[in-house]
Image: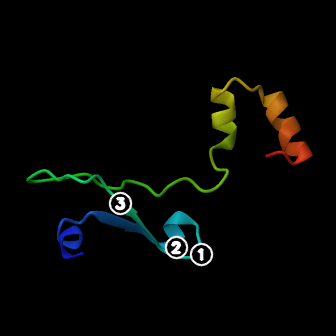
Amino acid sequence: GEQTKNREFFGSFSQQECGLDRDIRLPKAAFQFRTDGPRLRKPPPRIGQETISILQDLGYSMESIKAYQASGVI
């Protein structure tokens, strides 16, 4: 509604920024400060963009990850 528009509750990223087939709108935090407030700094990661780092954080070796890639699991 009008209140969410006036409070700039949503931010947006262009098709080029987010790598999708369209522009996207994302909610920011539901609060604001008097002189500043929450912002969207970068678009969300693309599908699969962080798969390797997440698997490494979970303890998988690069050898296992490469085997998953070769077999089409990821």
> How many other residues sit within 10 Å of disc 2, few (<14), some (14-19) or many (≥20)?
few
Q: Is residue 62 left or right of residue 2?
A: right
Q: Helix, strand or loop at disc 3? A: strand
Q: Quadrant of residue 39?
A: bottom left
**Tag of residue 27:** 3
Q: Is residue 70 left or right of residue 29?
A: right
Residue at the outermost top position: 59
Is 23 or 5 nearer to us in this picture? Answer: 5
Q: Is residue 29 left or right of residue 15?
A: left
Residue at the outermost left position: 34
**Real-space Cα distance between discs 3 and 2?**
17 Å
Question: Of marks 3 and 1, which one's residue comes earlier in the chain?
Answer: 1
Q: Helix, strand or loop at disc 2? A: helix
Q: Is label 3 in contact with label 1 (beta carbons under 8 Å)? A: no
* Rendered position, 26 above or below 36: below
Determine which residue is flagged by label 2: 15
**Real-space Cα distance between discs 3 and 1?**
19 Å
Q: Is label 3 or label 1 in front?
A: 3
Quadrant the N terminus occupies: bottom left
Task: Look at 8% across and 53% down and name the residue there.
Answer: 34
Determine which residue is flagged by label 1: 21
Q: Is label 3 in contact with label 2 (beta carbons under 8 Å)? A: no
Residue type for callout 1 = Asp
* Rendered position, 65 above or below 37: above
Q: Is residue 70 left or right of residue 2?
A: right
Q: Is label 2 in contact with label 1 (beta carbons under 8 Å)? A: yes
